[in-house]
Amino acid sequence: MSQEKEQEDENEIKIKDHRRFNVDGTEKDAVAEEKTSSPEEKLPEVDFAGFVLSLAGSVQMALGISPNPFTGKVERDLRQAEQTIELLGMLVEKTKGNLSPEEKQLLEVVLSDLRFRFVEEKKKG
């Protein structure tokens, strides 16, 4: 492999998306998508759905459903999961009447799913 090609490969960032839901609230396929980007590419615009899904991803990591993207290890922290779920619940209360129907549905679906998963994980001990 040429030195130029090796340098290009070193500058690429690979991202695995382990979130369970698409931006529109529908459930993703079981296979995680893999994307490759370079450092020069702009990050996607931040929106409410992305914020909710980011918090949901944090809960999934804390529940041990998704691996930590930095270590690749599955780590479980139920206290952290519970706190982030409570934060999402607070968002429901504080944003009443200010969300689009799609945003409201996404937040409700994600929150109910995470609460269910939390109860399941807590029963495991």
Image (tube, rainbow, N blue to C red):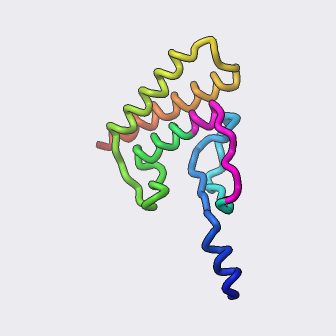
Which of the two residues, 125 or 78, is positioned nearer the viewer here? 78
| Magenta extent | 40-53
Q: Residue furthest left?
A: 125
| Residue located 63% across and 15% down the image | 98
Horizontal side of residue 19 vs 120, given as left or right: right
Q: Measured along the vertical axis of the image, is residue 32 above or below residue 7?
A: above
Query: Depth check: 102 or 119 in front?
Result: 102
Residue nearer the viewer, 1 or 114 = 1
- Give residue 50's quadrant in the image: top right
Residue 2 x, y percent position in the rendering: 70, 87
Query: Residue, x 62% and y 11% (percent of image)?
Result: 97
Task: State the image quarter where residue 79 is shown.
Answer: top left
- The residue lying at 57 percent from left, 51 percent from top is 18
Q: Assess whether residue 51 is covered by the magenta stretch.
A: yes
Quarter of the image for the C terminus: give it. top left
Total labels drawn: 0
Residue reaching furthest to the top: 97
Side of 64 where 18 appears, left or right: right
Question: Considering only vertical position in the picture, is 11 above or below 121?
Answer: below
- Tell me if I can see residue 122 in this picture: no
Whether residue 7 can be seen here: yes
Q: Position of residue 114 (x, y in %)?
A: 48, 34
